[in-house]
Image (cartoon, rainbow, N blue to C red):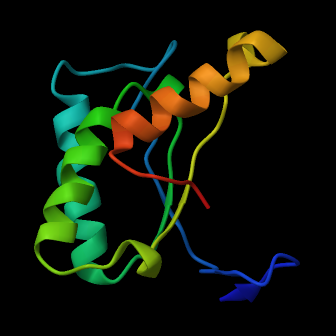
């Protein structure tokens, strides 16, 4: 892991949750497929998840996270990041986008 200026440690290897969006082909079940991929990644030992609202799968990833927490994984053992999409960069939209991501992921904070 890397020690950040904040004093937090960030795992050097993260699991990206892009599952097809925009011009990329996107199967109707892509969000649920990514949720299963997150479950598998967590079981394999990944502790850094890289998410984004624009991937359109945060609610399903949130369900996978809640399953992991119910099975005994502690939130403070994870490093979860997300991104504010370009359409939400104005000061009137940033907070709403962050709150929406937190709600979708079922988390109290992002790292």
Between 18 and 104, which is closer to the camera in this rendering? Answer: 104
Left or right of residue 104: residue 54? right
Considering the image in quadrants, where does the C terminus appear? bottom right
Q: Position of residue 72 (x, y in %)?
A: 17, 81
Residue 48 picture location, percent across and down: 50, 69
| Figure check: 110 above or below 11 | above
User: In what quadrant of the picture does the N terminus appear?
Assistant: bottom right
Residue 41, horizontal then vertical, whole percent? 30, 69
Q: Position of residue 18 (x, y in %)?
A: 46, 40
Q: Quick one: 15 or 5, which is closer to the camera?
A: 5
Which picture quadrant has residue 38?
A: bottom left
Q: Is residue 27 left or right of residue 1?
A: left
Nearest the viewer among 7 and 84 is 7
In the image, what residue occupies the spot 26% across and 58% down?
65
Residue at left 82%, top 17%?
A: 91
Residue drawn at x 21%, y 62% as measured from the top left: 39
* Residue in the image at 43% along x and 81% along y: 77
Answer yes or no: is residue 21 visible: yes
Q: Is residue 88 left or right of residue 69?
A: right
Q: Is residue 57 above or below residue 49?
A: above
- Residue 6, by quadrant, is bottom right
Residue at the right extreme of this rendering: 5
Q: In front: 30, or 106?
A: 106
């Amino acid at each position: 892991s890397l020690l950040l200026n904040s004093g937090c440690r960030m795992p050097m290897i993260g699991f990206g949750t892009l599952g097809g969006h925009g011009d990329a082909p996107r199967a109707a079940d892509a969000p649920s497929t990514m949720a299963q991929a997150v479950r598998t990644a967590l079981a394999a030992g990944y502790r850094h998840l890289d998410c984004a609202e624009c991937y359109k799968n945060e609610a399903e990833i949130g369900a996978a996270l809640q399953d992991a927490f119910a099975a005994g994984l502690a939130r403070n053992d994870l490093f979860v990041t997300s991104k504010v999409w370009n359409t939400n960069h104005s000061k009137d939209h940033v907070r709403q986008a962050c709150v929406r991501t937190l709600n979708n992921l079922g988390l109290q904070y992002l790292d």
